[in-house]
Image (tube, rainbow, N blue to C red):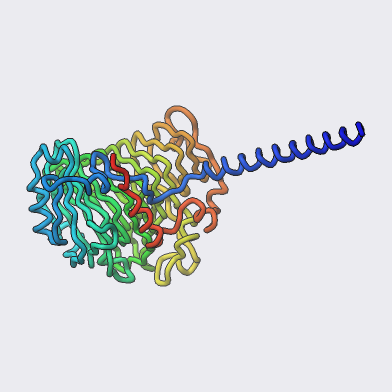
């Protein structure tokens, strides 16, 4: 009897040890899964200093306007609020409808213009009453000189096979946020002459499709920010954005990048957070001469890896060999930093102040190493990541996927 008891006791201990081991393995696998950063749009990102949509629905009539999807109605509603009302919280809800845009070029006629003001505690929320999909822009759109507002949750339709007519430009939009805008084919920010701009947020901006830019020797970047004469820009944030590539046509000498900073005045204090950038023919990020350029939990897919999700289209430079090989970064930013980010492809002539938890795909030159702290983590296998690796970290931004994210954003009563 004693022998049987001892045998059972040993078997129980053995089973317990197996269960503990299985539990440890499960915890380890879960920790690996939970440590994988998911890049791109997320419901956790929402404009700063802005009433949430849930909070705004509770406002009384002095703080809440409901207007048709009409430029004049929106402008008048925004400009009707007093400083005191805005600082307590103000919203312009837009009724369902569609508007034909008048272009997103620097000289295009803006959809809305000259609204809001700077220096207020909170921003005025401008958003569709019934959420993303209820208000649609057909064609490209520009907004200009919009201050202290959060403009977003608008859907875009139409467009063509070359990525035209589904663009958005925010020109001279100091202390403002543009959020939950999709699906776009081009996107940009600009300043205007003799007018500095600052504190600009681009949140959940999604350009999901790669295009052949059939426009001979036109740079045709996917997205850009450009500063005008005596119009510097500072404190520009990208959070939860997704930028697909553009491909120049065969024989073109275009300098086609995915997101380019350039201009006639300084641009500084730029941060990408939880953003995915797929490399275009030339580069993923063209940093220009930016000062204080930061990557935070951001994935830059230069080199051939961009083609794992976006094969080179017929008629494009690189189609014959089946790939393009863009730089991860091009240009010469100064005082740059990277935290928990991955950069695939060359990092160019940028001067790095420091990095933490960030990896590149090749052994860099001495001048490409951070000036202080840890050197780059070097992982050559990153140059050969496949579609499955990308899909595990960057969900494909389908309309259903975006609908869920945009619907969940701003549900909290507080921000």
Image-based side of 379 in relation to 41, left or right: right
Residue 379 percent coordinates (x, y): 55, 43
Query: Residue drawn 11% across and 45% down?
Result: 62
Against 76, is 232 above or below? above
> Between 107 and 345, which is closer to the camera in this rendering?
107
Q: Position of residue 207 (x, y in %)?
A: 34, 58
Q: Residue furthest front?
A: 1
Q: Is residue 358 visible?
A: yes
Residue drawn at x 31%, y 50% as measured from the top left: 260
**Looking at the figure, which quarter contains the N terminus?**
top right
- Viewer-proximal residue, 204 or 336? 204
Give the residue at x 37% y 43%. Answer: 273
Q: Give the x, y percent position of residue 378.
A: 54, 40
Could you tell me which quadrant the C terminus lies in? top left
From the viewer's side, name the closer residue of 407 and 245: 407
The residue most toward the top is: 372
Q: Is residue 370 positioned above or below 98 on the image?
A: above
Residue 174 visible in image: no
Q: Quadrant of residue 139?
A: bottom left
Residue 182 left/right relative to 150: right
Residue 7: horizontal and vertical position, in percent?
87, 36
Q: Looking at the image, how many numbered discs can be counted on the residues?
A: 0
Residue in the picture at 57% in, 40% down: 31
Q: Name the quadrant containing residue 245.
A: bottom left
């Amino acid at each position: 009897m004693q022998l049987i008891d001892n045998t059972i006791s040993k078997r129980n201990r053995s089973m317990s040890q197996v269960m503990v081991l299985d539990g440890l393995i499960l915890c380890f696998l879960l920790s690996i899964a939970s440590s994988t950063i998911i890049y791109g749009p997320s419901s956790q990102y929402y404009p700063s200093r802005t009433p949430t949509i849930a909070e705004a629905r509770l406002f009384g009539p002095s703080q809440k306007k409901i207007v048709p999807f009409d430029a004049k109605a929106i402008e008048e509603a925004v400009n009707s609020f007093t400083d005191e009302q805005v600082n307590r919280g103000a919203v312009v809800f837009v009724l369902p409808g569609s508007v034909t845009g008048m272009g997103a070029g620097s000289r295009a006629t803006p959809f809305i213009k000259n609204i809001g003001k700077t220096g207020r505690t909170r921003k005025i929320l401008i958003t569709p009453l019934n959420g993303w999909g209820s208000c649609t822009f057909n064609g490209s759109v520009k907004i200009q000189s919009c201050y202290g507002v959060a403009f977003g949750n608008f859907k875009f339709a139409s467009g063509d096979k070359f990525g035209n007519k589904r663009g958005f430009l925010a020109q001279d939009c100091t202390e403002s946020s543009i959020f939950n805008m999709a699906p776009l084919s081009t996107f940009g920010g600009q300043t205007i002459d003799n007018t500095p701009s600052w504190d600009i947020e681009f949140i959940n901006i999604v350009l999901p499709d790669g295009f052949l830019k059939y426009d001979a020797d036109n740079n045709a970047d996917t997205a850009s920010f450009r500063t005008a004469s005596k119009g510097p820009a500072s404190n520009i944030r990208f959070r939860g954005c997704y930028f697909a590539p553009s491909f120049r046509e065969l024989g073109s000498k275009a300098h086609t990048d995915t997101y380019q900073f350039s201009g006639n005045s300084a641009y500084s204090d730029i941060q990408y957070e939880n953003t995915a950038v797929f490399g275009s023919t030339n580069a993923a990020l063209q940093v220009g001469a930016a000062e204080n350029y930061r990557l935070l939990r951001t994935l830059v897919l230069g080199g051939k890896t961009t083609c794992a999700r976006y094969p080179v289209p017929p008629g494009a430079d690189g189609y014959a060999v089946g790939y393009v090989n863009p730089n991860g970064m091009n240009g010469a930013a100064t005082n740059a930093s990277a935290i928990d980010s991955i950069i695939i492809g060359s990092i160019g002539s940028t001067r790095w102040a420091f990095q933490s938890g960030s990896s590149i795909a090749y052994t860099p030159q001495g001048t490409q190493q951070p000036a202080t702290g840890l050197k780059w983590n070097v992982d050559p296998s990153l140059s050969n990541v496949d579609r499955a690796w990308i899909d595990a970290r960057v969900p494909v931004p389908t309309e259903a996927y975006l609908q869920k994210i945009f619907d969940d954003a701003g549900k909290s009563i507080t921000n």
